[in-house]
Image (cartoon, rainbow, N blue to C red):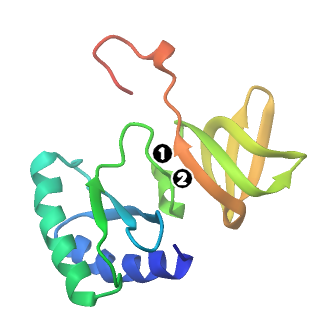
Amino acid sequence: MAKDLVAELTALLEPLASGHGLEIIAVEASGHAGSPVVRIYLDSEDGVNIDVIASANSWISDALDSADLIPTQYTLEVSSPGIERLLTKRAHWERFTGENATVKTALAIDGRKTFTGRIDGMDGDVVVLSAADTTYRIPFDTIRKANLKVDFSSIEEGKTR
């Protein structure tokens, strides 16, 4: 499905989510035109639970049906961003400074398109990521996909971060 649809869905849903105290982390549209799948990832400062997801599913479905942006039947999936959440906005890079992430870029940087390391934040329009003795400077606009990367071997028992 077209990037335009994702942009339209995001523009439609962001103000509604904000009114419910939620943030749209990402909107995805996939599948074929006859039966697309729309995925909405939500979060809030307090996190989201199943009750929040169920409630959001209802108002998101109503909004999508009213706007009629998808002319066919579709499958709606509403979810929390999960432990290895997507990093889609500049603010996420500041919020998760010190955490590990994997970044995939559209263009090669220093001969690579995939980077994993510790988030050192943003420097203007550049994401700063450190791995071992190397610091990567990744232009935000070149990021195709990025998510937190949990190192399960370093997690203490009963502690997720």
Label 1: how many residues lie within 10 Å, few (<14), some (14-19) or many (20+)?
some
Estimate the x, y position of residue 62 in percent, counting from the top left. 16, 78
Label 2: how many residues lie within 10 Å, few (<14), some (14-19) or many (20+)?
many
- Left-right relation of 158 to 31: left
Q: Residue furthest bottom?
A: 67
Residue position marked by numbered label 1 in the rendering: 96
Q: Residue furthest right?
A: 111
Q: Quadrant of residue 141 in the image? A: bottom right
Q: Going 38% across and 12% down the picture, which residue do you hit?
A: 156
Estimate the x, y position of residue 115 in percent, counting from the top left. 72, 40
Above or below, 52 relative to 67: above
Query: Looking at numbered disc 2 in the image, what kind of residue is underneath it?
Result: Trp
Q: Going 33% across and 79% down the picture, which residue do you hit?
A: 72
Q: Is residue 124 visible?
A: no
Instruction: Choose between 54 and 115: the one closer to the eye.
Output: 54
Residue position marked by numbered label 2 in the rendering: 93
Instruction: Choose between 30 and 105: the one closer to the eye.
Output: 30
Q: Which mark is residue 23?
A: none
Above or below, 34 relative to 68: above
- Left-right relation of 85 to 54: right
- Left-right relation of 144 to 111: left
Q: Going 77% across and 40% down the picture, which residue do you hit?
A: 135
Q: CA distance from mark 2 to mark 1?
A: 5 Å
Q: Going 70% across and 37% down the picture, which residue do you hit?
A: 130
Q: Quadrant of the C terminus?
A: top left
Element at badge 2? helix
Query: Looking at numbered disc 1 in the image, what kind of residue is underneath it?
Result: Phe
Q: Are marks 2 and 1 in contact (CB under 8 Å)?
A: yes
